[in-house]
């Protein structure tokens, strides 16, 4: 089994929001990727962003600036 | 063969459009159906197209919902917003894709008339407003004559009277500037296969933030699987089922071409061809309709005393392809008195050439003289 690490996970209400997240991350060189939304988060669009915990503030600020909606934010071993 | 029916569908398109459609068949799965690589590839095409379309009309990507074309978009909009007890203002220029949804609802309708020159008559418009007036539905440019309506002026007028402003941009998206915020447009219907150079079966509705339209179709959305109701968030709110990803790949290529070329350049090119054609009509026994100095690339006319279909048939035999007959705009024909005769519509594209215009004129003259 792969070892779990402390991870930032953000879920989104629509796939359009998730795709916007992916674009923002690419443009601002934020490490991470889209993953299936984990069972313990609201199902939302079925996609979640898996990133680094230290990028949480920067990521959420960029999402706010770009008017991208998110549903839940968690930092946990995943 | 010379194709001059671009107001019906743009036959001549950038080669990148067909290539993008072709390439997409080897690249994508279903969009919004999970995060496997093929699904993400599809979703990137969909989202990228939303972004480019949104940028074209001064909106946010999430406010762009895709449909099979402007007819479906107008049905979503009209049937999802207008109630039977509403009063709606529209114009005699409108296409059946506006008129028939309104007739089906059975709401009260007032029609803005046109002047003898074919422009929209604004002189008595304030008198049309009633307590239950909910919206104005207006084409940006008439599909029959190409006459352009001043969206900024109508947007201000709707704002002043507190009614929504819905625009049919079937003939103008990609060829005239559209600024939804500046023009105070509440919702805009567009089609992909005309001046956006995309594939048939693409189009959509752009809705201002905060305006709720009841969806026409509900069902698979890829999200919120266990909810009994279709998701409320745009754009999913107005989209159900598998998107036309391959078509959207082509539409995106069309949008990219327009961005690179420039709307002004495209419009000027169409105007140049149109003016060349108009100049060549001098001395011929024709009646022009709505021949303002500037329209979208359309010339609508009739040969005095002749059925438009007869002349269209002669043109077709000569290899000149145009549209004749009713053009799905019944009230516009009534206003011009051409219900029986129909009209001959020549519509030019950025990709037509001066030589094609001259050849079409020669063929037309040979028929008439």
Image: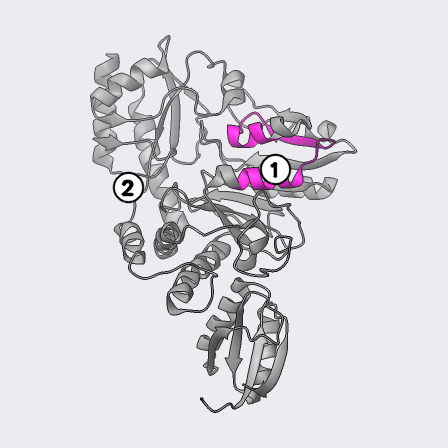
Residue B189 at x, y percent in the picture: 52, 43
Q: Residue furthest right?
A: B131
As displayed, is residue B337 above or below residue B111? above
**Residue named by callout 2:** B12
Q: How many marks?
A: 2
- Relative to residue B170, is residue B281 drawn left or right? left
Which chain's residue wears label 1?
B
Of all residues shown, which one is farthest toward the top?
A: B305
**What residue is drawn where x is 56% and y is 28%?**
B100
Element on which disc 1 rests: helix
Mark nearer the N terminus (1 vs 2): 2
Looking at the image, can residue B150 be seen?
no
Q: Nearer the viewer, residue B311 or A40?
A: A40
Q: Quadrant of residue B127?
A: top right
Question: Which residue is denoted by mark 1 in the rendering?
Answer: B78
Percent across and percent down for residue B333 are 49, 19
The reply, left or right, for residue B56 in relation to residue B78 is: left
Range of magenta residues:
B73-101
Dot 2, crowdedness within 10 Å: few (<14), some or many (≥20)?
some
């Amino acid at each position: 089994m792969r070892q779990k690490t402390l991870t930032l996970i953000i879920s989104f209400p629509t796939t359009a929001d998730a795709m916007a997240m992916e674009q923002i991350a690419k443009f601002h060189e934020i490490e991470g990727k889209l993953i299936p939304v984990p069972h313990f988060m609201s199902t939302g669009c079925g996609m979640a962003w898996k990133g680094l915990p230290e990028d949480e503030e920067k990521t959420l600020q960029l999402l706010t600036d770009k008017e991208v909606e998110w549903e839940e934010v968690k930092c946990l071993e995943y | 063969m010379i194709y001059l029916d671009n107001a019906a569908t743009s036959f001549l398109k950038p080669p990148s459009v067909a290539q993008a459609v072709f390439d997409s068949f080897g690249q994508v799965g279903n969009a919004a159906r999970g995060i496997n690589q093929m699904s993400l590839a599809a979703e990137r095409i969909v989202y990228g197209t939303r972004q480019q379309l949104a940028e074209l009309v001064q909106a946010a990507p999430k406010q762009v919902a895709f449909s099979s074309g402007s007819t479906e978009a107008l049905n979503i909009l009209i049937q999802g917003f207008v109630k039977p007890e509403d009063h709606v203002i529209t114009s005699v220029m409108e296409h059946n894709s506006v008129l028939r949804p309104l007739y089906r609802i059975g709401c009260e309708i007032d029609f803005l008339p046109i002047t003898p020159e074919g422009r929209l008559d604004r002189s008595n418009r304030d008198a049309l407003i009633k307590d239950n007036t909910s919206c104005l539905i207006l084409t940006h440019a008439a599909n029959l004559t190409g006459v352009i309506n001043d969206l900024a002026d109508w947007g201000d007028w709707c704002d002043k009277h507190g009614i929504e402003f819905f625009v049919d941009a079937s003939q103008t998206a990609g060829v005239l500037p559209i600024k939804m915020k500046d023009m105070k447009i509440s919702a805009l219907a567009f089609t992909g296969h005309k001046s956006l150079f995309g594939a048939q079966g693409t189009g959509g509705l752009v809705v201002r933030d905060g305006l709720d339209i009841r969806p026409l179709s509900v069902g698979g959305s890829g999200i919120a699987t266990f909810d009994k109701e279709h998701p409320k968030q745009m754009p999913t709110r107005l989209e159900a089922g598998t998107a036309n990803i391959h078509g959207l790949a082509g539409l995106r290529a069309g949008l990219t071409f327009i961005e690179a070329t420039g709307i002004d350049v495209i419009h000027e090119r169409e105007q140049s061809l149109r003016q060349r054609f108009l100049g060549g009509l001098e001395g011929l026994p024709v009646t022009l309709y709505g021949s303002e100095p500037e329209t979208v690339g359309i010339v609508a006319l009739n040969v005095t005393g002749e059925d438009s279909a007869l002349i269209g048939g002669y043109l077709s035999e000569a290899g000149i392809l145009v549209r004749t007959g009713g053009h799905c705009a019944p009230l516009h024909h009534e206003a011009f008195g051409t219900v029986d005769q129909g009209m001959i519509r020549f519509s030019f594209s950025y990709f037509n050439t001066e030589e094609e215009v001259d050849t079409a004129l020669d063929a037309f003259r040979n028929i008439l003289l």
